[in-house]
Image (cartoon, grey):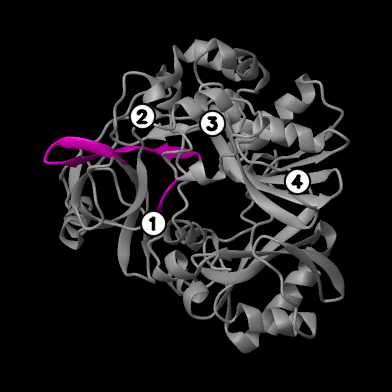
Amino acid sequence: MTTQSLESLLTEAGGPLRLLRAHKYARPDARDEFQPQQIIPVIPGEFSLWERETRAWRERVALFDQTHHMSGLFLSGPDAMRLLSDFAINDFTTFRPNSARQIVCVTERGDMIGDGIVFHLAPRQFSVFGAGFVQNWLMYQAQTGDYDVEARYDRKAPVYPNGFAHDRPDFRYQIQGPRAAALIEKLNGGPLGDVKFFHMTEITIGGVRCRALRHGMAGVAGLEIWGPYEKRETVRDAIVAAGREFELELVGGQAYLIGAIESGWYQAVLPAIYEGEEMRAYREWLPANAGEGMIRLSGSLAHDRVEGYYRSPFDLGYDRLIHADHDFYGRDALLRRAADPRLTKVTLQWDPEDAAALLREMLTPGGRDVRFLHLPVMCDKLDKHYDTLTVDGRSVGNSAYTAYTANERSLLSMALVDDTVRVGDEVVIGWGELGGGYDGYRVEPTDIVPIRAIVSPAPYSRVAREDYRRD
């Protein structure tokens, strides 16, 4: 394969849907990045038991290692703030050092490219962390636009050849749970002080001076801590030693994503970049094995055009972040869509009998060809999952990724629903795989199994819904 860019890959596949529905890992351009023998499991799937680790952030205190799985973009220079402002729906005029904000970027038509967290590290210095779609978009603008800015990209660890042999600039840990405050005070040798939500402070752990962001997950308070990568083991060992008193649990990869669904974070949006002349130059700039080229569109929801899978900030409840008094890319189109019908983010609680019936199918030799249920998390980080969602056979939106949470003893799915659906209603998820692809990269379809579910709030956790960000 001679593919060099996302655009040429789309041409080779025969269009966006054929590419997005295809199996990716066998592609020659992906082999150096994703061969299993080259990915060293730095973060185990579980340290103890994933169900025990899940309960830790609700009952005790949990330590997450976020060093490896997120991409980082570092921006510095006179025009760094202007670059962010030009391509974010947010207003950064009051953004000051030692604070952080969510950043959301859209296309010229007002569809989501992605979101992330931007840290204001110092005057004219920022970092952006997240899945990578926003970082790629901003890096492209920094390289091709008229900006006096230095941009440095730090790709998430799984895309490095030969496993995790490459260092990263910083380690990143997160301490969460009802006993987190007591642990943090012990680590600091005294109270940390009054740090507002999404504001930064400093803390010394194991003799290492670290920066920290007051953050939260699934409704419980905590800190995200980062410092020099070469000091990661020193800091981690100090946290673990101090945490024994508070029944600290190390959280592995299996439990990690469960917190996202408890918190109501909708991570399944397909970046709206795969068609349109206005995005062609960007697609030509993106390498074929960037995240946008490795995504697989999975699930039972069928649209004739890729645009059917795009979503706007209004659909995700991000309209609260839109500041129309500054000019940004996609502003006019986004404002024109303010009055359009929109979707609402909810959580779906699976019917236990239907979930058990699906498991019985999996245990029945010669049974139906169903999409298997993976516990605890039915979510590949490169998948964007869209299942049908109906009421009395009528489409009411789409279901997304699914997880089992021991905290709620429930199977939960994130979903986006139209304005006819209310909390407490019963809907039907079309659980299955539509299949598709091109050439030798085809994904086989499965039977579509109906799963009843009760529409519930997002966040699902009462604590997250009622207490998170209360101050």
Nearer to us of marks 3 and 4 is 4
The label shown at residue 127 is: 4
Q: Residue at x 78, y 55 (%)?
A: 170
Residue type indicated by callout 1: Ala
Q: Quick one: label 1, few (<14), some, or many (20+) residues within 10 Å?
A: many
Q: Is residue 290 magenta?
A: no
Q: CA distance from mark 2 to mark 3?
A: 14 Å
Residue under numbered circle 1: 458
Residue 272 in the image: x percent, y percent? 50, 26
Snapshot quadrant of residue 398: top left
Nearer to us of marks 4 and 2 is 4
The secondary structure type at the circle numbered 4 is strand
The secondary structure type at the circle numbered 1 is loop
Residue type indicated by callout 2: Val
Residue 365 in the image: x percent, y percent? 17, 49
Q: CA distance from mark 4 to mark 1?
A: 28 Å
User: Magenta span: helix, strand or loop, mainly?
Assistant: strand
Residue type indicated by callout 4: Ser
- In the rendered structure, which segment of residues is drawn in magenta? 375-398
In this picture, is 465 found above or below 87?
below
Dot placed on the residue nearer the N-terminal end, 3 or 4: 4
Dot placed on the residue nearer the N-terminal end, 4 or 2: 4
Image marks 4 and 2: residues in contact by CB distance under 8 Å:
no
Query: Which residue in the rendered view is the most extreme toward the front?
Result: 325
Q: CA distance from mark 3 to mark 4?
A: 24 Å
Residue type indicated by callout 3: Met
Dot placed on the residue nearer the N-terminal end, 1 or 3: 3
The answer, for residue 3, to whether it is visible in the render is yes
Residue under numbered circle 3: 294
